[in-house]
Structure formats: structure tokens, C-alpha cells
Image: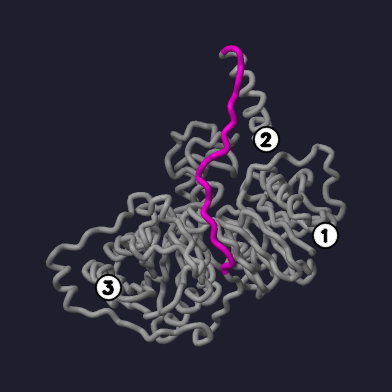
Amino acid sequence: MNVLVCCKIVPDLDRLSESDWLVQDHGQVDTGFVRTMVNPYDESALELTLRLADAAPARMTTLTLGGGQAEPFLKTLRALGFDPTVRIEAQGDWRFCPDGLAALIAAYVQAGHPQDLVVMGRQSADGDNGKTPLLLAEALGWPCITECIGFEAAGPGRLKVTSRVDAGRQIQVVRLPLVLAVGNAAGSTLRVPTLKSRMQAGRQRTEVLEPALGPAIPGFRQDYVLERLTAIRRRRAGRMVTGADGCALAQALYQDGLKQRLENL
Amino acid sequence: MKHVVVMNGCAGDLAAQARDLGDLLGRTGLRRQDGTTVLLHAGEPPLPRMPQVPTASAVRVRVSRYQPEQVLDILEELAPRLGAGLYLFVDDLAGRELAVRLGRRLGGTSLTGVRAFDLDGETLHARKAVYSGHMEATFRLGRGPFCLAIVRAGAALLPADDPGPVALLDLDRRQAPGWRAASACPIRPRPGWRTPASSWPRAWGSRTATGRHGWPRSPRRSARNLAPAGRW
């Protein structure tokens, strides 16, 4: 089984203080000084794929988009068994360009890298688009299962997928090929490679592909553009409740704050 | 602008969906008579009456179960008949998927997690949270039809004297083949849900099909039914 895992290197946004959320002249937030990490949902996707490969033979490829800052992460992934690791050297800002990302991945798969399964996180920490796996499935004409929290082999050409749906949890046995968007999968922190495997991985190289931008990507179309960014105020609107005693306070709290909400439930 | 509101009756929170989408339509100034609700449901027996919807007309589509590809095919088929420039979904798991994929299929633009939007002629400006909820971005969407998944805001209930839809079309698509799944088990409700069907003791077994589809089955009967299909 050929499995392609797409991952994104993102800034650790939890490290930013409130004063760091400033919009720069070019209309973006500067996160260049923050340490980077593998996008959490993608990390789950990588670990779940490793578990799949533990149980059944699979050829795991990982694909990312970006510059040289991704290399340490790709080296770790090579040490864990992802071979090859592919990086598309793309310039520019791809935070709000899920259409382009999906087109790039689809172009990679269709250009002589056939896959049975494409796995990725459901959304990235910075873009919050939540569209890439769905657009990729549409571009490839494959089915897509979102909010996946586990998967395992279920015979030749089939996969048993556990996913969250609005009404609960669903288990399906699905034919390949397939796109999986991994959601909040509990206990899916990426494992740590051994020192020996890490040293062996250091001798291998990342496959770097030439940049492909805009019209060069088949099927690329960006139909929405970012106009403005504003910081979201974290302070909540407060209202003082007054009353002569505790009973009156509770009565006022119920009448003004709770009654209508309870009726709306 | 003609608009379509898609409500997923398979999710079991129709009233909340109706009031949230209705509240948003009221705030954006879209006229009720320009809208059509597409209501998906998988009830057995079918819905006894039409629930409240935020538009003047409605299309009721009965499906065997919620399956995104099947729903997308239905919406794609209905699109020329409805002729809408705006499709609205609730921003839940199903709504996000339907909005993005339908936008792609109709050649339009999609956006999820939308908090508010304004129509400016043929252009739509939508606001949504980005950077893990730290910032709010305003996007300009240029190419219609626009497919938006709207964040739920906990709006008030629709008025009790709501007239309901005046035009109603019923479609039965239970027979449409599900091409995706080789097999699937019934949805397991989240533990602790107090639905009428799941209030029974769950000591029947962790793999017993309970939930929203009827009385709990015995583990032996479930195993007998499921094992030949290779589902477990």
C-alpha cells in the first residue's frame, strides 16, 4: 500500500503573547520569530500512518511545502520510516491558499507518484481553512473521510476507518484510494526515533521539487483573497448584577442572564 | 440574491440549525421569499410534519443515511433548478464538508467557519477566525455561487407563529447506491447521550448497535449479522 502523508510546518502560536498579535504592513502577522513545529493534526496523521505500517506493509511518503526550515522535521520523519520525504520549494504566502495546496498535492500524485491513500490533518494552525483535504478529494475524484481518529488495514485494497460524525462515531470499511482528514485523535503524539535511525536518516536527502506557482499548477484557482486582519478581543463583556441580598442577586442573575438561554436550549 | 439553506436532519438538531441560520439570514437582509431550504432526513417513518425552516420554500430529501457523496450528488442535481447564488450550511462536521465540496463542484467559492458576511453586488465579504482563533480575517469572495459554512451563534428560536414553507417538494433518494463504503456499521452515539434509544443499559456489549436506530440488539444477533459482511 502506498501512503502519502502531507504535513505542514507551522509556528507554535501558543508561544505568542497578546502584544505579538500585530498586523504588519503587508497585512499578515509576523510569526517568523516563533519556534516551528509540525501542525498538530498532521502530527496525528503521521503517527496513525506509522501504526498502519506497523501492522501491514506500507510505503510511506511524506510531502510538505516550504523552505529549508522544514529539513529538521523531515529528517526526523525519515528516521521514523518515511521514505522518500519530499519538499516542494514554494515561495510566497500559502497560509490562505488551500486551493493551491490541494492542486499541488493532486499534481504530485498524478505526476507519476500513484498513491492508495493520502492522509493529512484536517486544518492547519495558522490558516484555519479546513479545506485542503476536501478540495484534494474533489481534484482527484476520490472519496474523503473527515474527522478521522483511527484507521487500520482491512484486507487487500480496503481500510477500516473510525471517524467522528455529528451524531457520534462511525466505523466504515472503505475501498481505496481514499483521502483521510485526521481530526482530534486521542493519544496520537508522534513517536520519537532512536538515535541510530536518526543518524542513518541523516545520510539520506530530501527530494526537493521545483517551485510551481499559480497557473503552473493544473486546476489551481484562488477565488478568495484576504482583505483585512484584525485582532480578536479576548475580553468578555461583563455586567454587574446588583441586589440587596443573595436571594435578590440570584433572582436577578436568573432573570437577566439565564432564563432566556435556558428557554432556548 | 436567491439563496439555499441546507439543513441536515440526520444530525438530530434541526431546530437549532433552523434558528441559527434564520437568525443569520435576518441579520444579512436576505429576503425569506428568495430562499429555499433543502432538508435532508433519514427518518423511518418519514418526518410526520415539516419542521420550521427559515425560508419560504423547501425541498425535503429522504436519504437512507447521511453519506456526503450522495448528498453532494443530490445538491448538484438540484442546483440548476434552484438557481441560487448563495448556499448556506451550518458549520458542523457535515456542513463544512458539504460547503467546500459543493463549492468546488459548482465552480464557485467556499469558506468555512464564517461568522458574518455582507453582499456587495456580485461580491461577498465574509469574516472568519484564523490563526487558531487569535485573529479575524475578512475575505473577499469573487466567484459565485458562494458556499458558506456558518458558525453557530446560539440564536433565539424562530417565532411560534412562523408560517412554515409555502412550497414543498418531496424527493426520495433512499435507493441511491453508496459507492464509497464497502460496508459501514451504525453510528455509535457519544457515551452519555440521553436519547430515548440509548437510555437503556449499555451492558449489552460495546459493539452492540444501539443509538438512534432502534432498540438495542443482542450481541449474538449483531455478531451474526455483521460477521459475514466482514465488518468487524
Residue A59: x and y, percent?
A: 31, 74
The verdict on a common chain for dots 1 and 3 is no
The image's mark for residue B34 is 1
> Looking at numbered disc 1 in the image, what kind of residue is underneath it?
Asp
**Percent position of residue B209, x then y:** 51, 44
Q: Is residue B18 magenta?
A: no
In the rendered image of this protein, does residue A132 appear above or below residue B192?
below
**N-term mark: 2 or 3:** 3
Q: Is residue B159 left or right of residue A160?
A: right
Task: Give, as a single range, the part of the protein colored magenta.
Answer: A226-245
Q: Which residue is mark 3?
A: A71
The CA distance from mark 2 to mark 1 is 27 Å
Q: Which sits in the foreground, A255 or A115?
A: A255
Residue drawn at point x = 31 percent, y = 55 percent: A189
Chain of the residue where label 1 is placed in the rendered structure: B
- The residue under label 3 is which amino acid type? Glu
Q: State the residue at coordinates (27%, 75%).
A: A83
Residue B229 in view in this figure: no
- The one nearer the camera, B134 or A101, is B134
> How many marks do you count on the picture?
3
Q: Which mark is residue A53?
A: none
Res. A6 visible in picture: yes
Q: Left of A13 or right of it: where is A263?
A: right
Q: Rate crowding at label 3 as few (under 14), some (14 to 19) or many (20 or more) other CA atoms within 10 Å.
A: some
List the residue tagged with mark 2. Answer: A264
